[in-house]
Amino acid sequence: MAPVLDSSLPRWEADPILMVEHLFMRFGGLVAVNDLSFKVGRGDITALIGPNGAGKTTVFNCITGFYKPSEGRLVLAHGRAPTPHELASVTLIGERSLVGASSGVFLLERMPDHSVSGEAKVARTFQNIRLFTGMTVLENLMVAQHNALMAASGYSLKGLFGLPSWTRAQFEATETATYWLDKVGLTDRADDPAGDLPYGAQRRLEIARAMCSGPILLCLDEPAAGLNPRESLELNDLLRSIRAEHGTSILLIEHDMSVVMEISDHVIVLDYGTKISDGTPDHVKNDPRVIAAYLGVDEDAVEEVEAEIEAEVAGSTTGVTS
Ligand SMILES: Nc1ncnc2c1ncn2[C@@H]1O[C@H](COP(=O)(O)OP(=O)(O)OP(=O)(O)O)[C@@H](O)[C@H]1O
């Protein structure tokens, strides 16, 4: 039976798909991520924001297995979140995953990047587009399914003899690629080299390629970078439909606040590797610490603003006006 979720809690508390716990990443003397904890809700669009150098991409690199964190735990749950007892059992026996009847639990910090994508089903895109520019648009989407196709081919034998399971897998991979080509509006460019596409189309192709691997968590590093306002709106629609039609949870790093505030359910703000705010878009955009981090105001000024807000709130509840 599906567990009953506490509707009084935000989704990231009631039903987290990813739990980042006390994450540290040090590069020599530089602490790029400093004791960071946050949760990503299942089916939510979650944004990780912060000024340049705040540590956002480093967090992505830890989640997706590109970096081994200096400390901390990264728990991904395919089904319901694990109980503390289940989590302790995976952690203590030194395993990197627990694939039970109802769910799979993965400790991402213990997994290499290919297992994070292949087993834990976390896909990502990069700040700088990384397509195979010499391959066609369609080939880029087929390559994304290479691992599944290799397994279906029995690592060549079934493919060599053209067994039905291999033919079926090939057909399904082509269907998946065709579906995503259509979804991102690139069907008529299927046979063109990916490098010939305009910039905005390359960004959409990257997202389509990530979706071809069937992720349950899609991590997007600055998907709106370099897009014009019309393309940003199209991106918003694409991400909303990925969430609505495929139930994929999305974690994105983004500087474009029109994208962040428009489509996010949950926003986490980093500054110098530390979390300074965590909540709904409305909560975050009115948080004096966030305003200060973006405008470069110092701590004293933040405390002053907070005191002013508290005084105003107290005044309005007692009916005192200034
Ligand atoms: N491989 C590395 N070696 C050394 N320092 C690094 C490495 N990767 C990141 N850093 C440093 O860690 C800090 C955080 O960098 P990161 O790229 O994560 O920030 P960011 O928030 O993603 O920035 P931006 O918005 O500009 O992309 C920076 O000071 C950066 O120079």
Image (cartoon, rainbow, N blue to C red):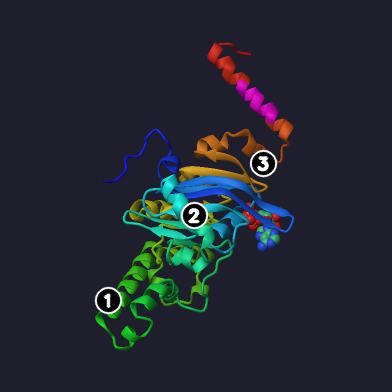
Mark 1: which amino acid?
Arg
Q: Nearer the viewer, mark 2 or mark 3?
A: 2
Ligand 1 in which quarter: bottom right
Q: Which residue is mark 2?
A: 91
Quarter occupied by residue 173? bottom left
As drawn, 31 above or below 145: above
Magenta range is 303-310
Please name the predominant secondary structure of the magenta segment in the image. helix
Mark 2: which amino acid?
Thr
- Of callouts 2 and 1, the N-terminal one: 2
Which residue does the image show at 49% across and 57% down from the upper left?
219
Nearer to the camera, 103 or 239: 103
Whole-percent x, y for residue 126 in the image: 55, 63
Q: Label 3 neighbourhood size at 10 Å, few (<14), some (14-19), many (20+)?
A: some
Which residue does the image show at 61% across and 24% down from the upper left?
309
Q: Which residue is mark 3?
A: 293
Which quadrant holds the C terminus? top right
Whole-percent x, y for residue 181 in the image: 38, 67
**Element under disc 2:** helix
Quarter occupied by residue 129? bottom right
Which residue does the image show at 55% across and 44% down from the upper left?
268
Q: Which residue is mark 1?
A: 168
64 with respect to 58 (left or right): left
As drawn, 115 above or below 2: below
- Of callouts 2 and 3, the N-terminal one: 2
307 in magenta = yes
- Of callouts 3 and 1, the N-terminal one: 1
Q: Label 2 neighbourhood size at 10 Å, few (<14), some (14-19), many (20+)?
A: some
